């Protein structure tokens, strides 16, 4: 599409040197160079990736202690699990937090089948964060397709908790539970926005449609 049609958000026939819309409107028709388009798209992706890294850092600061405690509980209740991850811990110092996240979520779902079904039907925020960390780890290891699956799981879990409608006044008026403190609310908001940014970045990288409809979001930044 030419620059004018793109700005006006109308269909362009792409005829050069002047499309039919510009001829009808008697205005100058211009096309943006392809290499400039690529640069703009790359810059947008880099900006999203930087925001994702920043939100990941904030989430790590808030959840590191909780994940570490969950890891200790998991090791105490399942020696085999502890042995397996102890062997993995020598791979890289950068994976230690990821091991804690994996141990934490495995401890959460280390239960009889009936109880597991109940837990999967009622995801918790720290469980969503653990799945997000798994996705980030897979992405860092170059396994983008696996990372995409994990991020999709995290997004669906977040949507099931209505994190994407956290600041919707209509839903807030129907909630029966006691009001949460600011830290708990902000943790939920940041968890959702990590899911959103991961979905957008992954969709652009994979060339597939986004799984999240922005019109359905009611969460403050």
Image (tube, rainbow, N blue to C red):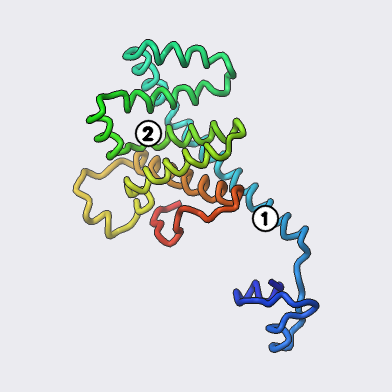
Number of the label disc, if any, that sits on residue 41? 1
Number of the label disc, if any, that sits on residue 15? none
Left or right of 134 on screen, residue 4: right
Q: Residue at x 48, y 40 (%)?
A: 149
Q: Residue at x 47, y 53 (%)?
A: 211
Mark 1 neighbour density, 10 Å: few (under 14) some (14–19) many (20 or more): few
In this view, the residue in front, 40 or 2, is 2
Left or right of 213 on screen, residue 200: right
Mark 2 neighbour density, 10 Å: few (under 14) some (14–19) many (20 or more): some
Q: Secondary structure at mark 1?
A: helix
Q: Secondary structure at mark 2?
A: helix
Quadrant in which the N terminus is drawn: bottom right
Q: Residue at x 37, y 10 (%)?
A: 79
In this view, the residue in front, 73 or 20, is 20
In this view, the residue in front, 126 or 160, is 160
- Residue 66 x/y as whole percent: 38, 26
- Residue 105 x/y as whole percent: 38, 28
Left or right of 20 on screen, residue 200: left
Using the rendered view, name the quadrant where residue 39 is placed.
bottom right
What is the spatial separation of the Cα atoms under label 1 and label 2, in whole angstroms?
33 Å
Vertical placement of residue 139 versus 165, above or below? above
- Asked if disc 1 and disc 2 are in contact, CB closer than 8 Å, the reply is no
Vertical placement of residue 203 versus 70, above or below? below
- Residue 142 x/y as whole percent: 62, 34
Left or right of 56 on screen, residue 24: right
Circle nearer the N terminus (1, 2): 1
Q: Which residue is mark 2?
A: 126
């Amino acid at each position: 599409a030419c620059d004018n049609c793109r700005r006006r958000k109308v269909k362009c026939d792409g005829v050069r040197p002047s499309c039919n819309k510009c001829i009808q409107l008697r205005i100058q028709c211009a096309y943006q160079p392809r290499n400039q388009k690529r640069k703009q798209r790359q810059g947008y992706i880099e900006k999203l990736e930087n925001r994702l890294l920043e939100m990941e850092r904030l989430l790590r600061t808030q959840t590191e202690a909780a994940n570490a405690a969950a890891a200790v509980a998991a090791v105490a209740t399942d020696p085999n699990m502890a042995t397996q991850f102890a062997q993995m811990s020598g791979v890289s110092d950068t994976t230690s937090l990821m091991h804690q996240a994996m141990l934490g979520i495995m401890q959460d779902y280390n239960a009889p089948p009936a109880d597991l079904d109940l837990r999967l039907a009622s995801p918790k925020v720290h469980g969503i964060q653990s799945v997000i960390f798994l996705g980030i780890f897979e992405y860092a290891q170059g396994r983008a397709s696996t990372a995409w699956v994990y991020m999709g799981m995290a997004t669906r879990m977040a949507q099931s908790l209505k994190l994407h409608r956290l600041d919707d006044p209509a839903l807030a008026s129907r909630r029966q539970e006691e009001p949460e403190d600011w830290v708990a609310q902000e943790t939920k908001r940041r968890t959702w926005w990590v899911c959103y940014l991961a979905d957008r970045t992954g969709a652009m990288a994979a060339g597939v449609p986004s799984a999240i409809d922005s019109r359905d979001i009611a969460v403050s930044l």
